[in-house]
């Protein structure tokens, strides 16, 4: 399918369920796709950070692409992350994703190496030229250790290099600056701004963002769709009530003991435990070397689900 | 061939020459291997940061492995970097490197994701179990944004997980702590400590390091071998004189204009320009999206080579 | 005067005008106080980052306190920053501020030294005990290099140590978490949350913040008061329109050439140039070692003021 | 007294003993000064990071200056840190230190504020002009979050602004670059390079540094003087043996439980506990809000002292 000129709505970053021997659990992944589409999402974003893309070998990435594109079957568009260190490696992932039939790709700045704005710009231009599909810039300083500047984003948008932005920088002031300047300029027409910040979706939509890519949307897609729909209808008070429920639910990402594991293990472990508890996926297993939640931590996840009305 | 129980000497991180269409220039790479072996190096480290590994797609990595292992032909051992974000991806690279016939592998902590010491330890243990070859920890906080602690390194050394350390942290006090504690403990016998800090090799050897992995060793392998040999013979004054010549030469990494390019483009561009000027490789091209040095900047590289007696 | 149980509204961080010989220009400061009070602000925050507090010797700080407390003369409450490295130094500033008659104090975490959450908590408790006045925590990671956690803030609020939070962390999700949890708990009654993020004031108020401390409010207090009043009246569309005008105006902080000066010189220089252009203060001079804007840069400030309807 | 044209030797950063009510314990401080001078040090550095300068109010700083300058009584020169956020505040401290009779001052880059190399340069020039005494640049990125570049240091040295460098950056390669370039240039004659890195003093002296400012030198001044003297006599093997003993002793800085306290509390607490155990100062108390070591942790300090032959 073709992406709309301006992608909007809830496009969750799809978790990747695992089997006990560290393979992609495709049966669970298929159920997760249905869970999300049934929840009313506008698209699916595979192979983003929430999918544990950094942990997935190329073979696993291929299985995810094939499974999700195949099972979505055109019901909603599929975006694919092409997360790797620099341009030629990213272009390899682009080719795989395009061949698998995705509808758009999501690209970060180079990482591991010390990069420069001029190199980041060249990177996006080369990747987009190779893609031949809509490209979304993925602004994720916590992972890549550089921030995409507003001038760079707007220049690439005006030149048709970028179809949109997935902003996970947490910098709402910077995001507003991009949204407002893109609107004020005459040379940028369809630039889709998606926020990855789960706790301020009503704010982002209020500022003019087009959609949201919430990791927590795996657990509660209906909630984020309800929030988006309220906002789209101008029912802001109702949107806020829903958002506040989701803020309270989001605290589940902190259940993991920080003396035993990193934030990634805690947050992704909690998302997957919640999906298992809700009966969507078979197991909360994560890719190594992440540390699994223990029984007590999973019990806390359960309490959050109950409190949020999800169990 | 088999690695010595304790790897010592100069093991340069081999640059990856490029053709104009961004392929590996194997003819130049073969000449570079000969240049290094003729210079007296004790081993070759391919697919490290200096090789632009972050920029090399898997196909290029395969060509590098095959070319260097094949052309070294057992004259010196070959270590291979298996640089990727997390465990399963790294293990894929390990399999490729082992199949290509390398003699040891070099592994960083996970990156892109927010990791934790417990996860880093699990990562090294899983990678080493998959490798079946000597594994060197690669401590490179500037790239992976975490530092390998002394306790972790020594525990992994004592357990036989690690054969050595390639320290590019720049933390000489920390390095000395590792060297001294490894020596003081009774349960660590052959743990090879290699420094990646080009400017303090005499210091590192003085403190008890076993060898050096100098990026600048591509340009002047004879110099680093001379420095190492002086130190090994206890001729410290002569070692220092040679080291100081190399400190002055190392300033060539700063020729690139920081308003136009990042540190990586400047340093790697200077190394490659120097190799081209010395007639070793055909071109100073770098992988995209790095920014090439301009004519003036290359002329500065030439001056440094002349001053160091290399042209 | 006494602070209201819950401070609300616009409380700008008052700039500190300078004479050519680096003294506090009290005549200009008095005019600035009137400009702000005439603009409808609810309070004044002196000796915050926007006041160049880091650059002001204790003598200058005393002049600022006396001038502003004296000239405000109870028309609006005055909060004072007591910015220094650690507890005993901060308590010295607290004593001076209390003696000068301020109505509340604003305290950061320790800085320069490597601190710890337990030390930060002890710091706030000791400073508050010494103050005997309402204490606001100042969350400013960009300056102090640590972030105040939600658990810490809520515990200190529940214990009556903190009267409020001035959040300049830029972390809107974290801010919402604090606001919502403070509301959900039964043991926190009057905890005033103020945002320092100029570009997302409507968002912050929408999420439940009580007020705003906008550096740009020096230049356009009427605008921020209008924005606040619209929000307080539930006129969110009008609030957004005003906020967007201020977002466009805020771009003036970027007029300074980053090859010549730091962000502080550029932003504070622009605020002061704007105040001079608007006839409020006599000169845009900043404390050394900040770099002054040049004529071209000041001309750009003027254009932003014209575009915003302020000249 | 006047500083030598080129300061050399061991110049420890003098700890500040405390009474139970958080005042400077001058009786202990006097004993500490004698302990250090008896140990053979070449100078004393007061009000540096190891003195808890960030925690000391101006009154305490004055007491330290008067006590140490008075009790040293010209036996060795006294350097004073003038640690504060920006230029005018630093100049106030300079005036106090000069009036107290110190022989040189030690100045960091501005902090708290986001600064720029041009502003740092202006800062050093203004402070030096106000001092009228030899000025040492204090390179301490861990505290001030910027690194002093070699070009800046050498330009200030050539212009007579700086008499020397106290390098606590941990960047030995950068330090060597400064030392070598200062030697190679014809326009820098007496620029004294002092390292603050306790674990690599033999290396620093080997590279050409003039002296050392070791925090651990409070605990064992005789050891550092012995190390320096061996190096000065060209007895490098003996210097290394002594250095290695001190490396093992230095591990005492890690006795504090990182879940209870920061690195500063742990390291300074260990130094002070060691001084108390050695009978030099009356108490290991630290300035608030630092967390004291507990009995078990102090017992560990004792074991390190015994192992190092100091008890």
Image (cartoon, coloured by chain):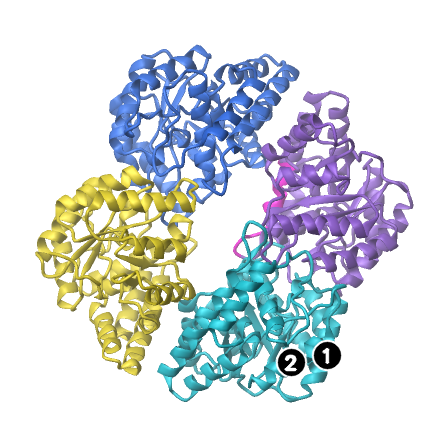
Chain colours: A purple, B cyan, C blue, D yellow
Q: Mark 1 vs mark 2: give the one in front.
A: 2
Residue A253, magenta (yes or no): yes
The residue singled out by tag 2 in the image is B33
Left or right of C58? Residue C181 is: right
What percent of the width, then of the height, locates residue D303? 29, 70
Label whose residue precedes the other's in the sequence (1 or 2): 2
Image height of A210 relative to C143, above or below:
above
Which chain does the numbered disc 1 sit on? B
Q: Is residue D282 in view from this perspective?
A: no
Few, some or many residues within 10 Å of mark 2 (<14, 14–19, 20+): many
**At 34% across and 21% down in the image, what residue appears?**
C103
Which chain does the numbered disc 2 sit on? B
The image quarter containing residue D201 is: bottom left
Check disc 2 and report its element: helix, strand or loop.
helix
The span shown in magenta is: A248-259
Label 1, label 2: how far apart the Cα atoms are? 9 Å
What percent of the width, then of the height, locates residue B159? 54, 77
Left or right of A159? Residue C7 is: left
The image quarter containing residue C35 is: top left
Number of numbered labels in the structure image: 2
Left or right of D262? Residue B13 is: right
Check disc 1 and report its element: helix, strand or loop.
helix
**At 85% across and 50% down in the image, what residue appears?**
A68
The residue singled out by tag 1 in the image is B67
Query: In the image shown, does A88 or D286 lie closer to the viewer?
Result: A88
**At 49% across and 35% down in the image, what residue appears?**
C256
The answer to whether mark 1 and mark 2 are in CB contact below 8 A is yes
Query: In the image shown, does D42 or A170 lie closer to the viewer?
Result: D42
């Amino acid at each position: 399918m073709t992406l709309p000129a301006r992608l909007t709505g809830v496009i969750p970053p799809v978790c990747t369920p695992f089997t006990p021997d560290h393979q992609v659990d495709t049966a669970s992944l298929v159920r997760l796709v249905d869970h999300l589409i049934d929840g009313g999402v506008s698209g699916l974003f595979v192979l983003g950070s929430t999918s544990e893309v950094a942990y997935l070998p190329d073979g696993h990435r291929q299985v995810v692409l094939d499974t999700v594109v195949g099972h979505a079957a055109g019901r909603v568009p599929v975006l694919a992350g092409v997360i790797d260190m620099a341009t030629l490696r990213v272009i390899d992932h682009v080719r795989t994703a395009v061949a698998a039939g995705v509808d758009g790709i999501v690209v970060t700045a180079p990482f591991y190496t010390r990069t420069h704005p001029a190199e980041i710009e060249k990177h996006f231009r080369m990747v987009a030229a190779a893609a031949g599909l809509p490209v979304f810039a993925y602004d994720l300083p916590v992972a890549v250790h550089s921030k995409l500047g507003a001038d760079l984003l707007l220049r690439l948008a005006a030149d048709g290099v970028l179809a949109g932005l997935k902003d996970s920088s947490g910098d709402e002031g910077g995001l507003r600056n991009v949204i407002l300047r893109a609107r004020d300029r005459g040379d940028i027409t369809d630039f889709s701004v998606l926020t990855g910040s789960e706790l301020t979706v009503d704010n982002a939509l209020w500022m003019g963002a087009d959609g949201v890519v919430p990791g927590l949307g795996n657990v509660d897609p209906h909630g984020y769709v309800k929030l988006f729909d309220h906002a789209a209808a101008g029912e802001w008070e109702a949107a806020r009530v829903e958002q506040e429920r989701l803020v309270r639910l989001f605290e589940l990402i902190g259940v993991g003991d920080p003396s035993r594991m990193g934030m990634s293990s805690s947050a992704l472990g909690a998302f997957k435990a919640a999906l298992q508890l809700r009966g969507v996926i078979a197991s909360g297993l994560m890719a190594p070397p992440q540390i699994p939640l223990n029984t007590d931590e999973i019990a806390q996840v359960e309490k959050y689900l109950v409190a949020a009305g999800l169990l």
